[in-house]
Image (spheres, coloured by chain):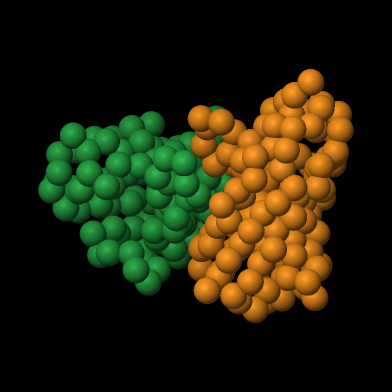
Amino acid sequence: QVQLVESGGGVVQPGRSLRLSCAASGFTFGFIGMHWVRQAPGQGLEWVAVIWPDGSEKYYAESVKGRFTISRDNFKNMVYLQMNSLRAEDTAVYFCVRHYSGWDYWGQGTLVTVSS
Amino acid sequence: QSVLTQPPSVSAAPGQRVTISCSGSSSNIGSNYVSWYQQLPGTAPKLLIYEDNKRPSGIPDRFSGSKSGTSATLGITGLQTGDEADYYCGTWHSSLSAGIFGGGTKLTVL
């Protein structure tokens, strides 16, 4: 069955970097667009970024544009989120999400805490 | 403030029916499919409705979706205490080239 497993979260100081990873299995990864969605503590869902199946196009939320980079490795069935210049407001659970029929499969999430 | 507007909360008694609205614009709901998500406390969101009104396998027909113009609606009939959760609508915003979600609606089953 479809599985998405995120890793790489943790506590990081403001201004530092962190890279999140998402291991995908159970579907033909190279044909599916992949997204990152985050949820700050006690808040709603915020879409972060998307990468096309072949990696040819990437789009970002305004709040992370220029600081975050989404990428994927279709040989390893992995999607990544490189987060630079982190701010306190980036503190959230980050979900890796597949988009085929809607955002149909979500990982369990990985918590990123930006704090000094 | 979310681009898609949902009521912060709704409530109804067990067995009753409730609807949750999601209001957007011609650049998002008006030109793209809407999907709906249920999030139980401490868990990842779960897809309930995709492409405006389709249910994934395993989602009971108590859940339904509809869309008219720039607004969408999630309907839940035969409410159960287990339906208490946060519900989100989501779609693509064409002019922003970005995904968007509503602010979420907390459903209380009284």
Q: Is residue A84 left or right of residue A5?
A: right
Colour for chain A in the figure: orange
Query: Percent from the top left, x then y, of residue A65?
Result: 79, 42
Task: Point out the residue furthest to the top here.
Answer: A116
Residue B55 visible somewhere in the drawing: yes
Q: In the rendering, at what x and y percent does residue A52 appear? A: 72, 66
Total marks shown come to 0
- Quadrant hosting residue A33: bottom right
In which image quadrant can residue A111 be found? top right
The location of residue B37, given as percent across then percent down, is 43, 52
Left or right, A101 with reference to A23: left
Residue at position x 33%, y 32% in the image: B9
Residue A58 seen in this snapshot: no
- Which residue is depicted at the point 30% across and 42% down? B84
Tell me which residue sits at (67%, 54%) in the image.
A6
* Chain B painted colour: green
Q: Is residue A67 above or below residue B1?
A: below
Q: Is residue B31 above or below residue A67?
A: below
Q: Which of the pair B45/B104 is nearer the observer?
A: B45
Which quarter of the picture shows residue A83?
top right
Q: Quadrant of the N terminus of chain B?
A: top right
Residue at 75% in and 65% down: A78
Quarter of the image with the C terminus of chain B is top left
Q: Position of residue B57 (x, y in %)?
A: 37, 72
